[in-house]
Image (cartoon, rainbow, N blue to C red):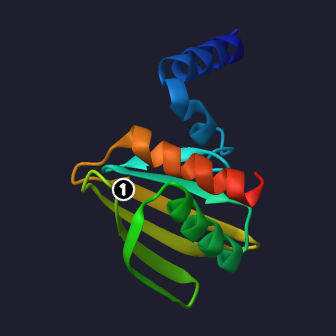
Amino acid sequence: MKKTARALVLLLSLTFLGGCELALLGVGAGVGVGAYKYIEGSLERQYPLEYARAWDATNTALANLQISVSGSLSEGGQGDIEAVKKDGAKVNISLKDMGQKVTSISIRVGTLGNRDEAVRIHNEIAAIAGI
């Protein structure tokens, strides 16, 4: 009877924790490929792409969306791109090679972060990369 009660308490706890149950089960310890993570105004996604291909797809996406690159630096499997949208909003993009042909791309649009615009850029990157 105690085992059943413990199992019930565990299941109810998982239900109340909402999106945290995967982390508790050890399945979602990190952000999975294709999943988004929104932290402090930046929207991060891991892509199943080698770093060089992700870098090229990101630059192509910015050109397609008519976002002007004002500066970029790529070295050692990490890169940063600074850009400006037509409305003057700044766009900061960071890429990081995670190994095993996975690249993390973090996008921040504006000072406080604009999630919808970041999603739009991520969607364009994914479309160019064929994901």
Q: Is residue 37 visible?
A: no
Residue occupying the far top of the picture:
1
Position of residue 103 relative to residue 73, above or below, is above
Of residues 56 and 3, the one drawn nearer to the viewer in this rendering: 56
Q: Label 1 is placed on what type of residue?
A: Arg
Q: Residue at x 56, y 58 (%)?
A: 64
Question: Residue beneath label 1, please?
Answer: 108
35 relative position to 118: left or right: right
Q: Residue at x 45, y 69 (%)?
A: 94
Position of residue 58 relative to residue 73, above or below, is above
Element on which disc 1 rests: strand
Count how many numbered circles sit on residues in the image: 1
67 relative position to 127: left or right: left
Whole-percent x, y for residue 65 in the image? 50, 54
Q: Residue at x 44, y 48 (%)?
A: 118
Q: Residue at x 43, y 76 (%)?
A: 80
Of residues 55 and 65, the one drawn nearer to the viewer in this rendering: 65
Whole-percent x, y for residue 35 in the image? 61, 45
